[in-house]
Image (spheres, rainbow, N blue to C red):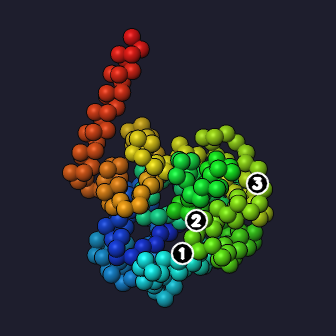
């Protein structure tokens, strides 16, 4: 899909996620998207990505605004750091998309984030582990802070200021509580369609699951051959290696033995289901 007035996409990372960042850039470039930047939290990631993509060195940013030493003891401070950086990007741009490095694009669907009348568009999460659970139980879904679009308006800026000042350190729980947990919202549209609501004078939308997939188990992921468009953002469960998850879901480039193994298993399982259906139907 050609993108009129292309939206910039921003991502954050450090050297620990170097291979994941490289994989993300490979897929972004396959989609012919060139309006992107990765804000590196250390010089090592910047040097690594510049060496891998020498024609795009200006897209890997490291400066006083992006530096952060991520470790388990400082994870609360990192969530707050992200909030501040989100706000800074909002002030500096008329609109942008933020993406986690494990949210993999299969095609350029940036225009789909520009929902008519919506200034804040997020990825909808509906599986039984959607976090925070009290919001999922209240409205049937949550929104993911790992993939979203925002437009620079006065109401959105105020929302992000409230986001920064919120006492909840976890950015995803904080934003879900601000949007849903502390106010009465009216959700419009059907289960699988785009949903709209208004919170804090901000027009919000959650994109269709058919476009933005957030599979918890691999069987929840509709494979590329069936859905060649959109973005797939698989859940990396606690204790799992995100590289392995991406390889298993065939979201890794170049192909590895893990990709190939799981592709064979998936194809065999799909054929088994068809044979089983035919057998019982007859």
Residue, disc 2: 172
Q: Residue at x 68, y 78 (%)?
A: 165
Q: Earlier in the sequence, mark 2 or mark 1?
A: 1
* Residue 278 shown left or right of residue 100 in the figure: left
Q: Position of residue 226 (x, y in %)?
A: 42, 37
> Foreground residue, 262 or 205?
262
Q: Residue at x 46, y 48 (%)?
A: 215
Residue, disc 3: 185
Q: Mark 2 falls on what kind of element?
A: helix
Q: Which mark is residue 17?
A: none
Q: Mark 1 falls on what kind of element?
A: helix
Residues packed near mark 1 inside 10 Å, few (<14), some (14 to 19) or many (20 plus): some
Q: Which residue extends farthest bottom?
A: 64
Q: Quadrant of the C terminus?
A: top left
Q: Position of residue 264 (x, y in %)?
A: 25, 39
Q: Earlier in the sequence, mark 3 or mark 2?
A: 2
CB under 8 Å between discs 3 and 2: no
Q: Earlier in the sequence, mark 1 or mark 3?
A: 1
Residue, disc 1: 79
């Amino acid at each position: 899909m050609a993108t009129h007035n292309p939206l910039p996409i921003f991502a954050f990372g450090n050297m620990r996620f170097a291979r994941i960042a490289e994989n993300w850039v490979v897929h972004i470039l396959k989609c012919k998207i060139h309006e992107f930047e990765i804000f590196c939290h250390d010089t090592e990631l910047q040097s690594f990505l510049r060496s891998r993509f020498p024609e795009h060195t200006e897209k890997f940013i490291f400066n006083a605004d992006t530096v952060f030493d991520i470790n388990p003891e400082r994870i609360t401070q990192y969530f707050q750091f992200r909030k501040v950086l989100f706000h800074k990007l909002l002030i500096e741009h008329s609109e942008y998309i933020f993406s986690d490095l494990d949210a993999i694009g299969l095609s350029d669907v940036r225009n789909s984030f520009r929902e008519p009348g919506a200034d804040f568009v997020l990825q909808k999460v509906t599986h039984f582990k959607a976090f925070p659970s009290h919001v999922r139980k209240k409205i049937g879904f949550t929104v993911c802070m790992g993939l979203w679009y925002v437009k620079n308006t006065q109401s959105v800026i105020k929302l992000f200021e409230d986001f920064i000042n919120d006492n909840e350190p976890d950015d995803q729980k904080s934003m879900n509580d601000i949007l849903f947990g502390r106010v009465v919202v009216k959700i419009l549209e059907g289960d699988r369609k785009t949903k709209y609501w208004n919170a804090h004078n901000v027009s919000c939308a959650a994109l269709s699951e058919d476009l933005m997939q957030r599979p918890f188990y691999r069987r929840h992921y509709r494979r590329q051959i069936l859905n060649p468009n959109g973005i797939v953002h698989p859940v990396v469960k606690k204790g799992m290696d995100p590289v392995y998850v991406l390889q298993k879901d065939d979201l890794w480039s170049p192909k590895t033995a893990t990709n190939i193994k799981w592709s064979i298993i998936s194809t065999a399982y799909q054929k088994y289901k068809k044979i089983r259906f035919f057998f019982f139907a007859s």
